[in-house]
Amino acid sequence: MIANTPVPPYYAVIFTTLRREGDFGYAEMAAKILDLAKRQPGFLGVEAARNELGVSVSYWSDLDSIRQWKNQFDHQLAQQLGRERWYSAYKTRIAKVERDYSFEFND
């Protein structure tokens, strides 16, 4: 689904990954981390897609909320496991969303 974000400005954390072969607990941890993120102050929504390249975009109200999420204990554990088990490469980008617009077809 497309995240229902507020009127800008807000922030996007773009997390792009290349996964290693095998699950090694990834699916379980991903579900746990998503549930935890949804309960964090400042969290606005998330969108994700995965084929060979995985891209997750989470939306946040402010930079302080992003910092707090980055330093959250369970999220730090997931980051460590990502480096050790799940990802062959990743990149995180943080961007300020200054405008957005949308289209939705209804028949």
Image (cartoon, helix red, strand yellow):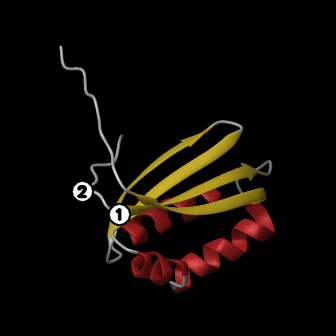
Q: Quadrant of residue 43?
A: bottom left
Q: Which residue is mark 1?
A: 10
Q: Residues within 10 Å of mark 2 (few under 14, many from 20)?
A: few
Foreground of the two, 2 or 28: 2
Q: Is residue 4 left or right of residue 25?
A: left
Q: Is residue 42 left or right of residue 22?
A: left
Identify the amino acid type marked 2: Pro
Residue 42 visible (yes or no)? yes
SS of the residue at dot 2? loop
Residue 25 visible (yes or no)? no
Q: Which residue is mark 2?
A: 6
Contact between marks 1 and 2 (CB within 8 A): the answer is: yes
Identify the amino acid type marked 1: Tyr
Q: Quadrant of residue 64?
A: bottom left
Q: Quadrant of the C terminus?
A: top left
Q: Residue 25 at x, y = what percent?
A: 65, 61
Q: Residue 86 at x, y = what percent?
A: 74, 59
Residue appearing at x 63%, y 79% in the figure: 77
Q: From this view, report whether residue 43 is shown above or below residue 86.
A: below
Residue appearing at x 40%, y 78% in the figure: 65
Q: Residues within 10 Å of mark 1 (few under 14, many from 20)?
A: some
Residue appearing at x 79%, y 51% in the figure: 20
Residue appearing at x 54%, y 60% in the figure: 30
